[in-house]
Every structure is written in C-alpha cells, then in structure tokens.
Amino acid sequence: MLSDPNDGIKREHVEKPANTSKVSSIEYETEPAEQLTNREFNGEGSSLPLSPRDSEPPSPPFDDHWKSVASSDNEAEDSTSGLLNRQTESDRDSVAAGSQDETNLDHSESSFVPQRNHHGRDLDREKPNQIRRMASERTRKHELIRFAALYLFPVVLALPVSLLLHLSVVQLVPLYNTFPLSLHTSAIYVVLTIPPVLLHWRATLSDSPGTAYSGRVCFLVAALAGDVLAVCGRRVGSITGELLGPEWGAFGARLLLGSGSIGGATAFALLCFDHISPISPATTQVEAVRNLVQVVLRSAGYVLHVYLGHTTWEKHFSNGAAILIRCPEKTMLFVSLLLTALSLLIRSEVTYSSFARRVHSFLSSQLNLSPSAQSSLAKFTSFLPKQIFPILLLSRLPLLVLALRQQIFLHPKSPYVTSDDQLRVLSSEQSLTGRIVVAENIRDNYRFLRCDHSILGGRWMRQVPHGEGIRTVLGDSIFAMSPLLEIAVLAHRSGPDDALLRTVAMTAGLQVIQDSSDMEDVVSNPQQRALTIGLGVGIAATAFVKRGLTVDIVEELDPAVYQAAIKHFNLSLPTSSTVHLKDGASYILELAGSAPKWDYVIQDCFTGGSLPVQLYTVEFWTDLAGLMEKDGIVAVRKNSVGVQGSKASRAVLVTLLSVFTQCRAFGDGFEKRGRRDELVNMVIICTMASSPLLTFRRPTSADVQRSPLRSHVYSTFHQNELQLDAMLDENDWTDEELILRRGRGEPEGWQAGTSFATWRTMQTLLTPAMWLAW
C-alpha cells in the first residue's frame, strides 16, 4: 500500500508474476501487457505507446561484448523504415516525459504531491488521459501518412520503371518491327515477376524479408537495368533474333532487358508492402503456402501498376516523335542516373550479419565445410565489404562510362561510316511511323531508305569523277517491284483511236501498228493525271513525271519519308503536282463523290508486314473507282498484304475482285518457285471498264527511259503472269469474312504470318551489323 501524507489518497500496487522475455540471448523481466494497460488506465503513469513498437518491452542493457558485436554488425538501418517511419522530436519528447513521470511515480513515492485546480479536481489524474488522447490522434495521423508513403513511393517508382520498359521496346522496333514486339506481353510480365516473388517468399519462411535483402539494393538493381539497356539493348535484340526468329527473339529480348527493372522494382515494393502489413514467418507447410499466396497477390498488384504505366507511356508517345524517344539510349541513361540518385537517399538496411558473414555462412552450409575449412574461408571472406550496395555501385561505373562514351561523347553524327566500313549512314531520324534511315551499302553499291526493320526502296549507285573529286550517280531501283507497278501505263484504254485499231484487227485480220511519234504523243498527254498512295523512294512518281503526267502524292502520315525521297533520291515534282501527308483512306473518303480526277492510281503501301485494312476495304475501292476515269487503271502492290495462300492475302484478292470488273496479276519472276508460306511479290492491275479486255501494248523508248531494269521488266512481265483463280478456293468467293469492310477491323491473327515472313525476307537483304546501324 502506498500512502501520501498530503491528501490521504491511497494507491494499491498489485503485484503479479513477471513475464520473462528473451531478446538476443539476454533475459529480462517485464510487466505483463494487461497490468501495464490497467495501470496506465487508472492514471498510474504517463507513458503511452505511440506505435505498436512502443508497447513492446524495453530492451535490456548490453554488456560490453555485445555492444562491440552490435556496433560492428548494425552499421545501417532498414532502408524503407529508416526513410519513411521516423518519429518527430515532439513524439520523442512526449515519450521521454511520460517515462520520467512513470519513473517518478513508481520510485519517488514520498515526493508525490497531487495538484488540483480551482474546482478541486486532481490535475495529475486528468493529465494521462489528455496525453493519451493527443498521442492517439498523432499516432493515427502518422500511421496513415506512413502507410500512404509506403504505398505511394513504390507506385511512383513504377513510372520510371515502366518508362524503361517502353524505351526498351522502342529500341527493339528497328530490329523487329512493331507486331512481334506486341505479342506475349502478359506472359512477359508474369515471367519477370517470378524471381522477386520467390526471393521474397523464401525470406518469409524463416525471418523478416528486411533482414534477407535490402530495399536499397533492389532500387539500385532497377537503376542498373537502365545502363544495361543503353549499352547492350541493341546487341541483345540482334542476337536473340538471329537465334530464335522474329516471334521468340522479340520475346527473349524483352525478357532479358526487362528482368532488372521489373525484378528490382517489384522486390522493393514487396518490402514496402511488408512494412504496411507484415507477413508472419511460416512454421508449417500450410503457412508457407499462405505466405506464397500473399506475396503473389501483392506482386501482381504492383506489376499491374507497372503495366498500366507502360501502356500510358505507349499511348502518350504513339506518334513516335516525342523528345524522350528520339534517342532512347540517352533517355535510359537519364532515368538510370535519376534512380541512382534516389537510391542514395534511402538509408541502408539493418543487418545482424554483414555481407561477408552471409557469404561465409552460405558457402559453409552449401559445401558442408569442416571447421578448419570454414576458418580458411573466413580469411578470404573477411576482405569482402560489409554491405553489397557499394559493390553494385562500383560495378556500375564501367557501364556508365561505356554508355556515356557510346551515346554522348563518341556517338557520330550523320553522315558517318560504320566501324566495319560496310555501311554509310546518311541520315537517321525518329519520325511518326518509326526510325527513318537513309544509308548506303558500300559493299554492294546501293542507297536505300529504311523504316524500322523494312526497306521501303533503294537505288543502285556508282561513283564518277567530278572536277577534282567524285560524285554519286543514282541508277535503277534495287527492287523489280517498282518498275512493275509502272506497267499500268502500258494497259490498253478505251480511247477512240484504240477502238478503231481493235475493230480493224478483228474484222480484217490485220495488225495495225501506230507510229512511234503518235505513241509518244499519247504517253506525254499533259491532261493525264496519276495518284500514288505511298511514296517509297519515289521511283514510280519520278517515272510518271518524266512521262509528262501530273502526279498527286499521298504519303502515309510521315513527312520524313517525303523529305528523304527529295533529298537523297532525286525526287523532283512540278508545280502542278500536289503532296498530301495524311492517311490515304481518309484522303479518298474526303474526295468521294467529286468529279473524276485520275487516269492511273498506284498503291504502294509497304507497312513492314502489318495489313493496313483501311486501304483494302470494299468502301475504299468503291470510293477510289468513283474518282477515276471510267477506263482508269489501278496498280496494287501485294507483297505487303500477306504470304501466298494466307487468309489476309486471299481477303485482299476477294475484295478487289468484288469491286473491279477486270484484274490481272504479275510477279517479278520468283513467285512460281515460292512456297505458300513465303511473301508474294506481285502487282495486281485492275480496271472498272468492261471493254476492251485488259491487255497491254508494247513498250516504247519513251516508256523505258533509258533504264535497263525497266526495259527488262516491261519486256518480260507477260511471262510472269499469275492466275488469280488458282490462288483462291471455291469457298473463298462466298466467305463473308474475306470481304474487308470499313470499321470492321482486321481479324485477330492475320498479321502473324505476313509479319514473320517479311522479317525473314528483310534479314536476307542486310547483314546483322547493318541492321544495328541507325
């Protein structure tokens, strides 16, 4: 019994058996939690728990030996809790004051003098309740802030991580095109999540994950991924493509390049979530399964944030000309340095054993070393640093130096010659539709225009003396498809002179040949007009201009292609010609219903293996036919719409034949030996006229334009005619799915075969080293 002589208030001290707790092999006695709570509730003290940790028993004093061990092993605090779980000075002052009050109450009985207000109420009894209310309010507020920070910090980290993933895809597009990189995205995220899930789950089986690995190290691993992407991204993508092909090469490259960023960020997020809601260590198999389910759900939720960030970046940079993706490697370096700076702000982890001791324990347990061998091993592991963070930080220095050297200090400006002296890059630009590159193959002497992993066209070149130096002279197209499109001008049309000649030939059995001068007058008729949808390097447009036709050009959305054709491939248009940098389908739809305008239409849209459905629908062809002369000629390049026998290829043929009255197809001489899974290099010539039959006149010197390739193609294309009926089955004519219609889109899976076949064909045109240069 405690008696105070001043007010006669009696206090009763209830003694109960003390609990014995054991921390770090040192035993000490504490009051039971129930007794402490009751005593505080009755006003017997002012010490209140400000957090769950404050309600735990105080730690006993360490002896000198334990202090020396603790000081050597506990040199750093937990990364996440050290950053986000700090108490304010006022909290510590209130706790210290409360502890002092309790000490005075328990050990200074004789000095206990209660204070009363003017109403006679005991102020010392009211004070603990007031402190409890104030501390409770602060605790709830601080815990909410702490939990919000522990959630928001890894979520904010998902933004630069998802940007790195998007930049890795942008970096690989010139090696694969877009379609292969859009496959298996969900599977990639699932596979990349497995390593951090297993690491965190393994840590929950025996101890807290915070003691198993460091959040600071995880943060640095995510930053390290940016350096690896900038230095090795292109090379990794090239190697996986050569080994695994377009589909699985793109899959493997995305896995390798995304493992560091996803793994590090997910492991860091799991540590943060563990501070919000700790996962209890598993002692049974059921608890281990329970922990695995919790870790999987948490990681899935976080990776979903990363995936949403990735899709957001992808939509934001869909036009391809944003400043952050003009040079993805430099942006990767910036993100990497930003993450590195943030990792330095995170406190290091609490470790009860240093990195060297962990390595020693792991090797000893795995190798079953004897005590003498363990002692020998300890001599070597003692040279290791106590933390792994400095090791990773130092290992990044060579990567940073190499990346800065490649992308900033030694990155050549166009034009430049590659290190193997086989390729000269004249210009390289990230534009709306992809990476537009103009380069010269020095070994084979031709200049080509490239968009991502597709060659849009090219011309042979030769060097000729010019004054004291030399100049480059451009020759024929490197592809026979370009002059093959021009045979549209050789098609017979239903003019009055042509009708008379056919009548004489059919009635009298005589063959009437027009005078060459008259033929040239017909060819150079200034009233004729041609439309080209898709420019390439401008081979067909240049040929039409030389024939005297007025040319209108619709280039698919990308001004960089048009500028490259003018600057590097000698495209020159008269003032009467027009250029429209917009979608071809939208352009035709805007003009639908107006007066007839064109005699010839060339559709030369090469999209790297993807099918531009809007340019092959029934509505598009119908609108286009209404804008042409009644006997106008349409030439369609078909190697961009499917492999031989594919559903996409058959759909294009069925749709064309359902609109135009007559169609004939011609190859460039190689399709007859091709397989059904290879690209079909052909041109389809169509007209709406029922009479005369779709036939072709002989070429003249004005048609050939002193071009050996054009002369060869014009004189041999009849021999390479392909029978359209043989490419279609009887059921194809009644299959409604094969009729392409506006707004219906392309059935899923049609692009796969065409995209992969295009990629394999393009791989044979340039060496892997040439594809890496841009």
Image (cartoon, rainbow, N blue to C red):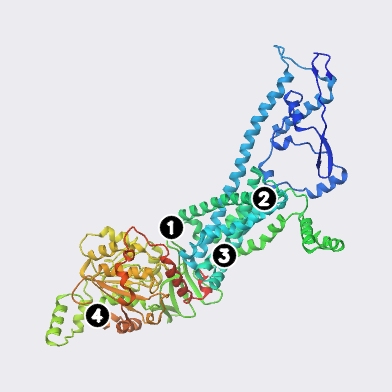
Residue identified by numbered label 1: 319
Q: Are marks 2 and 3 in contact (CB under 8 Å)?
A: no
Q: Is residue 61 visible?
A: no
Residue identified by numbered label 3: 233
Q: Earlier in the sequence, mark 4 or mark 3?
A: 3
Q: How far is disc 1 from disc 2 in space, using C-alphas?
A: 51 Å
Residue identified by numbered label 2: 286
Q: Are marks 1 and 3 in contact (CB under 8 Å)?
A: no
Q: Secondary structure at mark 3?
A: helix
Q: Label 2: few (<14), some or many (≥20) within 10 Å?
A: few
Q: Earlier in the sequence, mark 4 or mark 2?
A: 2
Q: Nearer the viewer, mark 4 or mark 2?
A: 2
- As rendered, which of 52 and 504 lies closer to the eye? 52
Q: Earlier in the sequence, mark 1 or mark 4?
A: 1
Residue shown at 33% from the left, 68% from the top? 652
Residue identified by numbered label 4: 696
